[in-house]
Amino acid sequence: MLAASVLCFSSCASRAAVRETRPYVWLTNNAKFILLPPAYIETPLDHQQLISASFQGRNHQMAAWVKADETGIDMTLMSELGATVGELFFRDGAVSFSSPLFPRAIGGEHIIADFQLSFYNAAALASALEAGGLTFEEAGTARRVFEGGTLIVEIERSRTVVRLVNHLRGYSLTLEGDFERDFE
């Protein structure tokens, strides 16, 4: 019976699945966000950031050196003592992430998606999110992602702090750095 079901679904031409080869994340249970090419970054970054994350009542803090430009995104995550505790790269359409501190379920694609929502070109984000069934709004220093009328992600950007709240998944990120030149 199972074999017949698999055969039926795999042979149905009207339901032929096109496998996505570009990296993506599910921003909601129904909406896929395909990561944008690095060329869509608003302003290149190359500096240290302090990252604070809150999830399920737990707070975490670490430093990161972030270099992001039209060629890719490189992040080196560091402990309070400056030791490298993780590396994340997004280059040539591929994500590479290694860190003993993060569970496997938190793939590098999720971190890149949050980074792109915060620092990438608004028009490119709006187009990519719309293709996934979501709506993107930018007003002043605020960015918001909606599914229907439900607020999914909210981002507030200033010259020294970027705060992202994922209402659906129940976490928040705060990035502190010298963004003065980035959001002028």
Image (cartoon, rainbow, N blue to C red):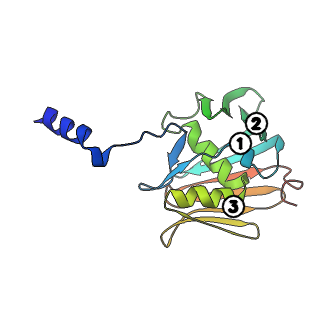
Quarter holding the C terminus is bottom right
- Residue visible at 52% across and 62% down? 134
Q: CA distance from mark 3 to mark 2?
A: 19 Å
Residue 84 occupies which quadrant of the picture? top right
Disc number placed over residue 130 in the picture, else none: none
Density class for disc 2 (Cα within 10 Å; few <14, some 14-19, many ≥20) is some
Density class for disc 3 (Cα within 10 Å; few <14, some 14-19, many ≥20) is few
Viewer-proximal residue, 8 or 115? 8
Residue 7 in the image: x percent, y percent?
A: 19, 35
Query: Are dots 3 and 2 in contact, CB under 8 Å?
Result: no
What secondary structure is found at the residue carrying circle 1? Answer: helix
Disc number placed over residue 71 in the picture, else none: 2
Q: With 100 as the anchor, is 142 left or right in this view?
A: right
Tell me the kind of residue under disc 2.
Thr
Q: CA distance from mark 3 to mark 1?
A: 14 Å
Q: Which residue is mark 1?
A: 38
Q: With 162 as the anchor, is 35 left or right in this view?
A: left
Residue at the extreme left: 1
Residue 171 occupies which quadrant of the picture? bottom right
What secondary structure is found at the residue carrying circle 3? Answer: helix
Tell me the kind of residue under disc 3.
Ala
Of labels 3 and 1, earlier in sequence is 1
Q: Which residue is mark 3?
A: 123
Residue 62 in the image: x percent, y percent?
A: 71, 39
What secondary structure is found at the residue carrying circle 2? Answer: loop
- Residue visible at 73% across and 34% down? 74
